[in-house]
Amino acid sequence: MNKYEFSLVLKEPLELTEEIANSLFECGCDDGSPGTCNGVFSIDFHREAPSLEAAINSAIQNVRDAGHEVEQVNIEATAMPQSA
C-alpha cells in the first residue's frame, strides 16, 4: 500500500482541545495531526491506502464518525523529476 499526504479542513471553527483530539484519534484519525491557524481547524494526514481516493474517503468518514464535517480537502502537488 502507498502512503498519501493530504489535509482536511473542517467546517466549523473549532479550537483544538484535548477532548476533540482524543475523539478524532479514537475514531481512526491516529495518522493525522490536528491543528488550528487563524480560526481554521485542519488535520494533516499521512494515510496508507490502496489509492488516494480511498485514503481521503476513509479519513472523511473518520472525521464524520467523530461528529465533524469536512469543508475542504487540500493535496499538495509533488514535483515530478524532469528528464534531461
Image (cartoon, rainbow, N blue to C red):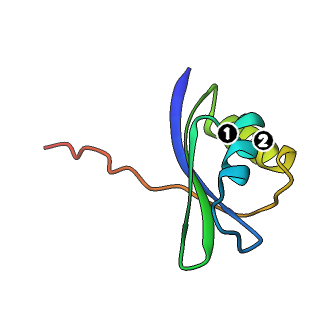
Left or right: 14 in relation to 77: right
Looking at the image, the residue that sits furthest to the top is 1
Q: Which residue is rendered at x = 65% and y = 51% of the image? A: 18
Q: Tag 2, which secondary structure?
A: helix
Q: Is residue 39 left or right of residue 24?
A: left
Q: Position of residue 52 (x, y in %)?
A: 61, 39
Kindly indicate whether the residue at mark 1 contacts the one at mark 2 (C-beta within 8 angstroms).
Answer: yes
Seen from the viewer's position, the closer of residues 17 and 10 is: 17
What distance separates the C-alpha of mark 2 from that of mark 1? 6 Å
10 Å crowding of disc 2: few (<14), some (14-19), many (20+): many
Where does the N terminus fall, quadrant-wise?
top right
Please state the horizontal and vertical placement of residue 21, each as a whole percent of the image: 66, 49
Residue identified by numbered label 2: 62
Which residue bears the numbered disc 1? Answer: 29
Image position of 25 with respect to 9: above or below: above
Is 37 positioned to the left or the right of 80 in the image? right
- The type of residue carrying mark 1 is Cys
Q: Earlier in the sequence, mark 2 or mark 1?
A: 1
Nearer to me, 50 or 44: 44
- The answer to whether residue 4 is above or below residue 38 is above
Name the residue rendered at 73%, 51% in the picture: 19
Q: Secondary structure at mark 1?
A: loop
